Image (cartoon, rainbow, N blue to C red):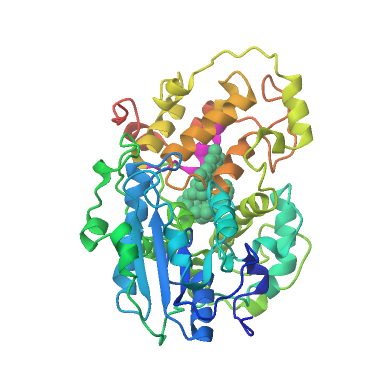
Amino acid sequence: MLEGSAVPKVRVRAVNDGSIREDGAYVLYWMVANRRYDYNYSLERAVEWAKELGKPLLILEALRVGYRWASDRLHAFVIQGMRDNAARLESRAVTYYPYLERSEGEGKGLLAALAEKACVVVTDDFPAFFLPRMISSAGKRLAVRLEAIDGNGLLPMRATDKVYARAHDFRRHLQRTMPDAIYEYPKQDPLRALELPTLAVPKTILERWPAASTEELEDPPLASLPIDHDVGVVDLEGGGVAGRARARDFLDERLAGYAEGRNHPDEDAASGLSPYLHFGHVSAHAVVRELANRESWEPDVLEPSSAGKREGWWKMSTPAEAFLDELITWREVGFNMCALRPDDYDAYESLPDWVQKNFDAHAGDPREHVYTLEQFERAKTHDEIWNAAQRELVTTGRMHNYLRMLWGKKILEWTCSPRDALDVMIELNNKYALDGRNPNSYSGIFWCLGRYDRAWGPERPIFGKVRFMSSDSTRRKLRLSPYLEKYGESAQLSLS
Ligand SMILES: Cc1cc2nc3c(=O)[nH]c(=O)nc-3n(C[C@H](O)[C@H](O)[C@H](O)COP(=O)(O)OP(=O)(O)OC[C@H]3O[C@@H](n4cnc5c(N)ncnc54)[C@H](O)[C@@H]3O)c2cc1C
C-alpha cells in the first residue's frame, strides 16, 4: 500500500475502508481546501498513487453554491485561485477539472460519478466548517478508498491526541516536537518532471457537469449564481500568484517592523496572509521556508525544549520569531482544537468550565448598551472605533488584528448574554471576513470569551474575570487616526 510514501503517515487519514481499484482509469485528487499546486501534501500523495499505479491524475477543484455565507466576495476570491491553478496546471502532466456549481444541488453526484472510475480518491483534511461533514459523507458513499491528507500546518494535526487549552502549553508541545517535524516538508513542486499517462475528462461527465471555461474563471458569472450578492467583491485578489507575491512583499519590506507595528491600525505591518492561508492558496510551509531563507536559517539549530518561551527558541531575528509565533503557535492551536473536538469546537459549551461558571455568575449584570445583530452589522453602535472596525470588515473583508480583539470583547459587553455574543461574532466574522470559517475564526472568537486565556482581575461587570478591553485605552495606546478617518461614518457600507 504505497510503500515509501514521502507523505508522513500521521498526515494520512483513511476516511473509509474502500479498496484500491487497480484497474481504475485514473487517480482522483478532490481539491477542497489546499487549493494550490505547490507545497501540497495531498497533491503529492495523489501523484505518488498515480506513479505507483501507472495511471493518469485527475484533479477536481469544485466550488459549490449551497453553503452558508456563500457570497460574491468568497466566490470571487476562490475562483481567482482556480484561474491560477488552471493556468499553471495546463502545461503539466495532469488533468485539471475546475467546476463551478450554477444552482444548488447541481453538482450533486459529480464526485461519485468520477470516483466510479477512480483507483483511489485523495482529498484535503480540513477540520472546520462544512468540510469535515462533506468528506465523511463522501467516504460513506464511495466504494473506492478515500484518503484525507493533512497539509494544514507545520505540525500534523493528529501527531497529538491532547487538546491544548492554552497557547503556552501548545508552544511547549511545539518546541518539543518541531525539531523532528521540521524535516518533514512537502515538495515545493510535486509535479516537476512528472511523467504520467494523460486523459480527458469523460464526455458523459462534462455533458452533465461542464468544466468552468477560461473566460468564466477570468470573469466569473457571479450575478447569475444563487449566492449573497450583498457581500460584494473586494479589492484583494485571491489565488496563489497574488498570495505568494504578498508573502514575498511582507517578508522583504515589512517583516522588520512586524513585532512593533502589528498592533497599530495605521501601520500596514502584518502579513495579510490569512485569506490565502484559509483558502489554501498559500501554504504555511512555503512561508516558513521563504522566511528561513531570508534569515539564513537552518533547522539543525533547533533543540527540543519544554520551556515554551515566546522568544529565542527559533534562533531567528525578533520580528521573525514574533511572526512565527502567530503563524505556527496561534494558527495551529486552532487546528488542534477543531481536529480533536470536531463535534463542539464551535459550541458555547466548549468554553473552559471556569469561564462558563464565571459568565453564569454575571448573567444578571445590567448591560448599559445592547445592540441587535442588525445594528452591529450596520456599524450603528455608540463607539467610533468599534464602528470603524466593523466598516473595515464589511467593506474590505478584513479587520485589523488588534481591533478584531476589541470588536469581539465589545460584542460580549453589548449583547444580552455570552451565547448571543458568540452567535453575533460567528455570523459577522464568517459572513464578511475572507479568512472566516477557519479554525482560527473560532480561536479568535472564543478567545474573546476566555478560551486560551487565564482569569484576570479586577472582576468586572458582565466579563467577570474574563479579560476586558476598552476602546478608550485602545485609542490611547494605538496609532489609529488615519484609520478612523478611512473607516469613519463616511465609509460606504454596501449593505442593501
Ligand atoms: C474575534 C476574532 C476573530 C478572528 N477571526 C479570524 C478568522 O476568521 N480567520 C483567521 O485566520 N484568523 C482570525 N483571527 C485571528 C487573527 O486576528 C488573524 O489571523 C490575523 O489578524 C490575520 O491577519 P494577518 O494574516 O495579517 O496576520 P499576521 O499577524 O501576519 O500573522 C500571520 C498568520 O498567523 C496566523 N495568526 C495571526 N494571529 C493569529 C491569532 N490571533 N490566532 C490565530 N492565528 C493567528 C494567521 O494565519 C495569520 O495569517 C481572529 C481573531 C479575533 C480576535
Magenta-span inclusion, residue 165: no
**Total number of numbered labels?**
0
Q: Is residue 77 visible?
A: yes
Lateral position of residue 108 relative to residue 477, left or right:
left
Q: The C terminus lies in which quarter of the figure?
A: top left
* 304 up-or-down from 158: above or below: below
**Occupied quadrant, residue 297:** bottom right
Q: Is residue 241 visible?
A: no
Lateral position of residue 261 relative to residue 439, left or right:
left
Segment colored magenta: 397-409
Of 329 and 320, the residue lying toward us: 329
Image location of residue 180, percent across then percent down: 69, 75
Lateral position of residue 296 relative to residue 375, left or right:
right
Q: Main secondary structure of the magenta part?
A: helix
Magenta-span inclusion, residue 406: yes
Image location of residue 103, percent across then percent down: 33, 44
Image location of residue 305, percent across then percent down: 77, 67
| Residue at x 41%, y 83% (from the top left corner) | 192
Of 357 and 409, the residue lying toward us: 357
Image location of residue 382, percent across then percent down: 45, 18
Of 361 and 278, the residue lying toward us: 278
| Residue at x 75%, y 70% (from the top left corner) | 304
Of 84 and 303, the residue lying toward us: 84
| Residue at x 58%, y 75% (from the top left corner) | 20
Q: The N terminus lies in which quarter of the figure?
A: bottom right
